[in-house]
Image (cartoon, helix red, strand yellow):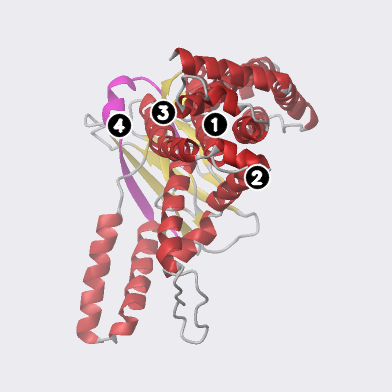
Amino acid sequence: MQKILAITWLTWKAALRFRLFLVIAALLVLAVVGLPMVIKDDGTAQGFTQIILTYTLSSITALLGLSTLWLSCGTLARDVEECQIQVVATKPIARWQIWLGKWLGIISLNAVLLAISGGCVYGLLQWRAGKLPPAQQAILRDQILVARGSAKPASMDAQIESETERILENRLKTAPVDKVDLAEVRRQIHEGVKADAQVVPPSYVKQWQIDLGFAKNYLKGRPLQLRIKFNASQKNNADHYLGMWQVGVPQKTLLWQSETMSLPQDTFQEFTIPPDLFDADGVLTVQFVNQNENIALLFPLNDGIEVLYPEGGFALNYARGLAVIFCWMALLSALGLMAASFLSFPVATFFALGLIIVGLSCGTLSETVESGSVGVGNEETGAAGHSVADIVLIPAFKGILTVAGFVKSSSPIDSLSTGRSITWLELGTVFGQVVLLIGGGIALIGMLLFNRRELAAAQGTQ
């Protein structure tokens, strides 16, 4: 361990010698302090947090990500190009220890920079929150500066699939279809059943039952928030739609009924509901009455309705969010060092950035994987083209999509800006998937490549 820590200290000295630490620290503080001054919020709690949390944390992540890639690619590649690594490699220290020491140096540097910038954001958030009107401060405390858990209705996938198969079977009995068209017919039936499960026709009532689970044990006497989103079948003049909400079950729980609400479509809305409306099993019954004439409303199955409940404080939740960002930086440092293990500095940087850009192109990759080929399809028949490259590229694209899915599903910025809880389990999952599984695999590849690299031979070709 002493050898690894020695390399870690040398990495710190290199970063300080290049003045990277001071430059990035200055840019981070400028992003934290400058953005809220340049971009004005609308005076609401939501607008306030969007500026302070969303923009500043996104800027911090981008700056740290770029500096991490630059340093991780440069610290190893430059040591090889400038003949410094040969001096270290001839000492009684294994190459994997050199690699690991540099990785620890980079992530410890990131930890310090992230702590400084994250602390500035937290302090600025608390200072600016005190300048909001009292009503907005109350919204901030209840909906944003808090860690809220989430509960949604049970998945309807099984019921939709079952109903799809039943309708398809009945249709085939009366009107057989060709085998070629069977998949398309089934898809159309599936979409119809799914739409029926989401739609609320005019003057109809739709009911959801939401199980709060273990949270029911500590939610007695505590108000909850209902978060909803819907789409309208057609627009009206005001682009606002009428509806009434009822929560609870008569004679089983307390019953609460809202006034008629006028709400916009295709945007999330939150409102508070009184405490103790769930039954003894922790099930909250929610009903919605569509009061619009000739306009059906559609509540998406995934995010149409959600119950948010207090689960913890903001400070600890914020620290867990920063820890998730730190896991991302650890992955980027492993990626940069892996590229520098067998490439020169410019090529390693280009290679690492290329992989990140490919990982962000999830839409295109998903379409390619679904079609099963990177070849050009036949426009007349609609059939996908095929090539020899499919054998290598399609599995590679699937792997990239899996990795990108791990990282994207763990984004803490949206959770923090909406007051969502980032649990210890979620943090542990991110650490296991992003750092240990993906980062560990990249690190292993990087160590193997660096161990097999001919340092002197590489220098002889310069």
Disc 2, SS: loop
Q: Which residue is mark 3?
A: 427
Left or right? Give the position of 145 relative to 151.
right
Disc 3, SS: helix
Q: CA distance from mark 3 to mark 2?
A: 46 Å
Q: Report the span colored magenta.
A: 202-227
Q: Residue at x 62, y 18 (%)?
A: 12
Q: CA distance from mark 1 to mark 3?
A: 14 Å
Q: Which residue is mark 1?
A: 329
Q: CA distance from mark 4 to mark 2?
A: 73 Å
What amino acid type should be assigned to the residue bearing mark 4? Phe
Mark closer to the chain start, 3 or 2: 3
What amino acid type should be assigned to the residue bearing mark 2? Thr
Left or right? Give the position of 296 relative to 212.
right
Q: Is residue 209 magenta?
A: yes
Answer few, some or many: residues within 10 Å of disc 2's Cα (few below 14, many 20 plus, some between 14 and 19).
few
What amino acid type should be assigned to the residue bearing mark 3? Leu
Mark closer to the chain start, 2 or 1: 1
Answer few, some or many: residues within 10 Å of disc 4's Cα (few below 14, many 20 plus, some between 14 and 19).
many
Q: Residue at x 55, y 35 (%)?
A: 337
In this view of the protein, can residue 421 be seen by the observer? no
Mark closer to the chain start, 4 or 2: 4
Residue 125 image position (x, y, % from top left): 64, 20
Give the quadrant of the C terminus: top right
Disc 1, SS: helix
Q: CA distance from mark 2 to mark 1?
A: 33 Å
Count of labels in the image: 4
Q: Which residue is mark 2?
A: 461
